[in-house]
Image: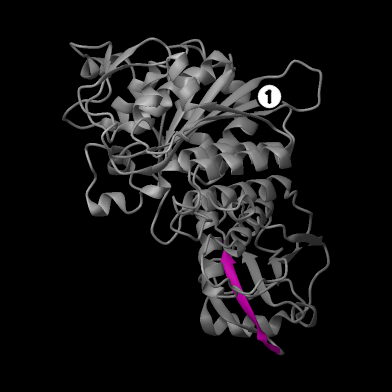
Amino acid sequence: MSDTKALLPKLPDPKLTSSRAQPDVRRLARYDAVIVLHQRRGKLTDLEISGADALAAVAARTGNANQVLAAVPGAPATPLAACRIDRDAAAFDRDTACRKTIKALAAASARSIAVVVDRKSLKDHSAAVSSMVTALMLADFRMPKFGKQPKRLAPLAITVFEPKKTNLAATRATARGNCLARWLTAMPPNKLDALGYRAVAEALAKQHRWQYRYHSAATLKRRGAGAFTAVAQGNETNDAGIVELRYRPKTGKKRPKVALVGKGIIFDTGGTNLKPFEGMLGMHVDMGGSAVAIATLATLSELGVAWDIDAWLGITENRTGPQAYKPQDVVTALNGKTIQTIHTDAEGRMVLADTLTLAGRAKPDCILDFATLTGAAINAVTTRYGAIFTNRPSLHPTLKTAGADSGERVWPFPIGAAFIESLDSETADIKQCAPGGGGDHILAATFLNEFVPPDVPWVHLDLSACEHKGGLGAAPTDITGFGVRYATELLTGHLREVTAAPKG
């Protein structure tokens, strides 16, 4: 295990300033870079900036695509870029436009950035400003790098020239949460091992004043969590377990209670059913679900939400070895169900089965779980969407709306009685997965549903968009941190709908 401090990221903490002043060219020349947000389909000829005739002349030569136009007139060292946000642009499209503009600007070393709202064309500017600030924060964040460290840069300073101040509290919190999730997901498995991950969780608990509790594999075995310990028993080191974190706001009122559950497979070899080289190379990201869960907890804590939150992180590796579990093993889960093991590379649903049972026993008003669970989800929706499931089908429109509003798009799939027969077992209560056929993302969610109390609304997000080549939405890296902004939007914007959703 590495030093805990080295395992924690330095999250972006930019100085955010709003100005109602109408900037002139001379003032803009003081910044390291300038980005203009606009809505024009034509050329940038109507910028409300003093001295805009010079800017318009530049725009007339270069058009208005999301690209660097030129330098600020009179300040050749200050690059200028224009980012067009269409009137009816969805959140994902706004985020993508902002990310591509920043990439084209190539101003990674810029520490002071002016974001100028074109007041004539961009009437409703707050969403565009939020997308740009998010993209700037995500681009400024440094992912884990070992060896010679790059020069430390001064904190980022962003000044937004806008007619009315945009509230960026939620923007800042979710951007920081995304960076935390990306950092943890990207960490090498010998750096962020199970002991290191527990140390990180404990350090974050102290920082955010969460309650911390660790359920060791030995304790879980004594309690009957045979699904989790089946996966953990292949580890040479006895350091697997479930981390429980509790956020409790300082209010005496009756509060709703939310459970966040995350799959934390530090590294996944596939177990006895060993993965091939290419399938194993990226398996340090298989703890991405737990990273989303803990980062969402950090985001909601920073926002100071007035409800109780428990986070449950199922942390282990899926290794080979003489003690590793194998196909046709029958194990008993924490809720008493017996499981016929079919494929040891379907370990995520085994770990989540007992983790969900623990979360359900705490009697939350709703449960959200996050997992890089199935390749079938990627086959179904690609790496551009998340695949989402729930035991409350009436929530499907709400789940899609939260995805559209957050910029992290999801697509709902069915689960339940129509699919459970595919998991019928002659030797146990249920099969872990089906030996063949398609739709494993649906069968995996159907399996997990058997370990969720039926009276508790539950949402399962299969993180097919955890990685996307070249970045996704506002995230500029292949590891996207997908899920933090989605969960934050779903819970802060739709919590009452989720907790009140009827069975059926």
What's the residue at 21%, 14% (across, down)?
Answer: 425
Q: Where is residue 319 drawn, in percent x and y?
A: 32, 40
Q: Name the residue under label 1.
A: 308
Front one among 211 and 171? 211
Q: In which quarter of the image is residue 72?
A: bottom right
Q: Where is residue 362 drawn, in percent x and y?
A: 58, 16
Disc 1 secondary structure class: strand
Please say whether residue 208 is visible from this viewpoint: yes
Residue 78 magenta-highlighted = yes
Looking at the image, residue 130 lies above or below residue 342: below
Q: Is residue 427 left or right of residue 483?
A: left
Give the colour scheme shown: one colour
Give the magenta part as a residue range: 75-84
Name the amino acid type tagged 1: Asp
Residue 200 magenta-highlighted = no
Front one among 232 and 369? 232
Please say whether residue 452 is visible from this viewpoint: no
| Quadrant occupied by the C terminus | top left
Magenta segment, principal secondary structure? strand
Q: In this view, does 123 lie to the left or right of 375?
A: right
Looking at the image, residue 370 lies above or below residue 135: above
Looking at the image, residue 305 lies above or below residue 90: above
